[in-house]
Amino acid sequence: MPERLSIVDEIATLRTDIVLYKNEYGNIQVPSIPHKDRKYGGHLMASPAKEVHHVNELRKFPGAFLGYHILCTLAEEAMLNVIPSLQGGKGIINLFEAGNWQVHPEREPSGLKDASFKSVHAHLYGRSTLEPATNDHERQLHWEWGEAPYFPAFKDTPFSPQRAVKNWIVPAQYNDDEIKSLKEYIEDAASRIKKLSQKWVAPLLRTRRRYQINAQANWSSPR
């Protein structure tokens, strides 16, 4: 008899990760299985284009470190200005660089994993004064305003290999109108940043590069 699909598997067949914005430094997306319901602030992810295991490794690639963090700020700004439960100072954003479940021994392939199984990505969680917290189940999904994020043990999440037996209510993704507005806001903000970068940042980077080349030449010249 075929294994019964969990609610997570059923939703995964209907949903995909929705890319809101992408450039040479990475992307911003709505995850197919968000950790926070859209009504209470929702959930976005930002990922660098370069697959690295630790954030500091992005410094090896020109512009990658700054570009990734700009993506995070674009996502944060868009959420605060577009999502109704966060607008007007009613909410905040928790920026969370994690990857713990990527290295969990029960995550496929099973077994002890080192840092090479982790890829850098940031979760952005909208936190709203509307977050319910009248029982343990609600606190698990929405955490309660003023409290730190709460994450269950991996075995109790829909990402566990044994998820077919889990009774997990998957939070709702942002709706079509919110996704459209988030895309438009991010694209406009990115355009403004690019113009500022061309005016101020690019000359600074060129100066830095000339300094690095000159320093390298000085050290490599015969003494």
Image (spheres, rainbow, N blue to C red):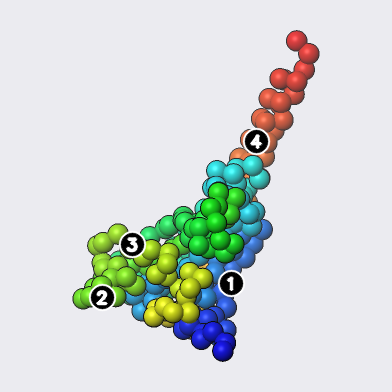
Would you identify the image quadrant in which residue 147 lies? bottom left
Crowd tier of the residue under label 3, counting other residues whose Cα lies within 10 Å: few below 14, some 14–19, many 20 or above: some
Q: What residue would you read off at disc 4?
A: 207
Asked whether the beta carbons under mark 4 and mark 1 sit within 8 Å of each other, the answer is no
Expressed as whole percent of the image width and height from the top left, the position of residue 21 reads 59, 68
Q: Amino acid at mark 3?
A: Pro
Name the residue nearer the viewer: 166 or 89.
Answer: 166
Crowd tier of the residue under label 1, counting other residues whose Cα lies within 10 Å: few below 14, some 14–19, many 20 or above: some
Real-space Cα separation, disc 2 to disc 3, in angstroms: 13 Å
Of labels 4 and 1, earlier in sequence is 1
Name the residue nearer the viewer: 80 or 117.
Answer: 117
Residue at (55%, 56%) from the top-left corner? 111
* Tag 1 secondary structure: strand
Crowd tier of the residue under label 2, counting other residues whose Cα lies within 10 Å: few below 14, some 14–19, many 20 or above: some
* Tag 2 secondary structure: loop
Q: How many marks?
A: 4
Q: Residue furthest left?
A: 134
Closest to the camera, between mark 2 and mark 1, is: 2
Expressed as whole percent of the image width and height from the top left, the position of residue 171 reads 41, 78
Real-space Cα separation, disc 4 to disc 1, in angstroms: 34 Å
Of labels 2 and 4, earlier in sequence is 2
Q: What residue would you read off at disc 1?
A: 19
* Tag 3 secondary structure: loop
Q: What residue would you read off at disc 3?
A: 149
Q: What residue would you read off at disc 2?
A: 132
* Tag 4 secondary structure: helix
Q: Amino acid at mark 2?
A: Pro
Would you identify the image quadrant in which residue 157 lies? bottom left
Asked whether the beta carbons under mark 3 and mark 4 sit within 8 Å of each other, the answer is no
